[in-house]
């Protein structure tokens, strides 16, 4: 298991590989699913053959490897958390992560409204490739327009003040970085859940985000995928109103135990438009398919939110295996690959220093 307080050189190298793998794996899954988001399984098979997509195909702009708001928002989550770590390390000021992550989401919001980086932009906001609007979630857009920063110590279990009935997957798909932060899984759960309330106020929406972050945290520490999910379930059980998220994850575990994965089985877990379904589909695919390539393809070939389920599955697989196991012929064609790698390495270095 990874010792957060006294990591060895080898353990630090493994940690860095997991951070890089999580962010790059999510981008691969996002890029695989983007061209077939909104398409039914029958249509996917009609266009790409009986097995559906078997690799990267051109997206809406006719270009292979494009990523969506899933990867964009995940990167801005990283930027906000890195700034929070840096602030605490240099100034000794803690507890400001909520506002800094919210401000980072505000910068992402600008990428959806502006054609290119404004003069003087720095960090991710200065990257022209991020100024692309590819079907971002309505709850993310409407929520960020309210500029709400949740209380990092607020009690969980009640509907949040922003989009209180929304449990879309737009919060869970951006929450992996909380689990990469070298904090205990319980802390990652709380941070992700409260940050999700920036845009998604339904308890299932923010509990799914918290559970995802906790699973990633356990994977970073070296746990198995099944073990990480079981530990996240025990954590979920502490909170009132967890039942929908818990049922979805248990459904994924039970289905994976049956073996023989198919797209039809994936669809029994839902379509992935809502948080607990997206998480369940990603967990199922990562569990049932031992080969990363097959798991990623299974996670996108269904009638639903293919880019989000692919991104979440890629986050899980990358956090579990590191970046060296990712399919290189896909990775080298993913939009922003070099920049994502730099963001991952900078974040890992900051977390190790912190």
Image (cartoon, helix red, strand yellow):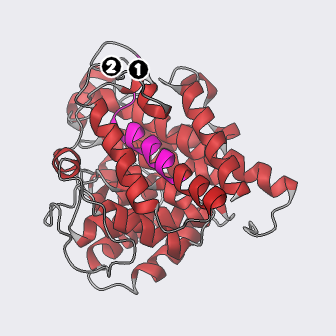
Image height of 35 relative to 185, above or below: above
Q: Position of residue 243 (x, y in %)?
A: 28, 79
The magenta stretch spans residue 274:
no
Viewer-side residue, 49 vs 28:
28
Q: Position of residue 198 (x, y in %)?
A: 27, 59
The reply to whether callout 2 and callout 1 are in contact (CB within 8 Å) is yes
Quadrant hosting residue 327: top right
Q: Local crowd at mark 1 within 10 Å, few (<14), some, or many (≥20)?
A: few
Q: Is residue 296 left or right of residue 207?
A: right
Query: Residue at 50% across / 25% down in the picture?
Result: 336
Query: Residue at 45% across / 24% down in the picture?
Result: 127
The magenta stretch spans residue 65:
yes
Q: Is residue 18 left or right of residue 123?
A: right
User: Which region is colored magenta?
Assistant: 64-81
Q: Secondary structure at mark 1?
A: helix
In the drawing, what numbered circle is on residue 128?
A: 1
Viewer-side residue, 5 vs 71:
5
Q: What count of labels does the image hold?
A: 2
């Amino acid at each position: 298991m990874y010792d957060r307080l006294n990591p060895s050189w080898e353990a630090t190298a493994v940690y860095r590989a997991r951070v890089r793998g999580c962010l790059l794996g999510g981008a691969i899954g996002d890029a695989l699913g983007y061209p077939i988001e909104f398409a039914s399984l029958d249509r996917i098979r009609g266009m790409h053959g009986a097995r559906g997509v078997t690799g990267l195909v051109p997206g809406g702009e006719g270009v292979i490897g494009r990523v969506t708001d899933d990867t964009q928002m995940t990167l801005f989550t990283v930027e906000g958390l890195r700034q929070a770590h840096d602030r605490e390390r240099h100034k000794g000021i803690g507890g400001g992560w909520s506002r800094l992550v919210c401000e980072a989401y505000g910068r992402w919001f600008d990428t959806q409204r502006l054609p290119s980086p404004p003069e003087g932009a720095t960090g991710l906001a200065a990257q022209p490739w991020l100024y692309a609007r590819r079907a971002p979630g309505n709850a993310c857009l409407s929520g960020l327009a309210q500029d709400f920063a949740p209380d990092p110590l607020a009690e969980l279990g009640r509907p949040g003040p922003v989009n209180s009935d929304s449990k879309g997957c737009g919060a869970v798909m951006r929450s992996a970085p909380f689990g990469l932060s070298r904090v205990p899984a319980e802390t990652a759960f709380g941070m992700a859940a409260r940050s999700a309330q920036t845009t998604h106020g339904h308890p299932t929406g923010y509990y799914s985000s918290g559970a995802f972050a906790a699973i990633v945290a356990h994977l970073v520490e070296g746990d198995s995928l099944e073990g990480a999910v079981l530990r996240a379930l025990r954590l979920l059980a502490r909170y009132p109103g967890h039942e929908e998220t818990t049922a979805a994850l248990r459904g994924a575990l039970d289905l994976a135990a049956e073996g023989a994965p198919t797209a039809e089985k994936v669809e029994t877990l839902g379509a992935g438009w809502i948080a607990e379904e997206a998480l369940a589909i990603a967990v199922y695919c990562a569990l049932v398919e031992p080969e990363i390539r097959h798991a990623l393809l299974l996670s996108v070939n269904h009638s639903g939110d293919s880019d989000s389920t692919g991104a979440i599955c890629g986050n899980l697989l990358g956090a579990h295996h590191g970046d060296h196991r990712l399919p290189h012929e896909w990775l080298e064609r993913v939009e922003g690959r070099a920049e994502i790698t730099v963001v991952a390495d900078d974040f890992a270095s900051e977390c190790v220093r912190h």
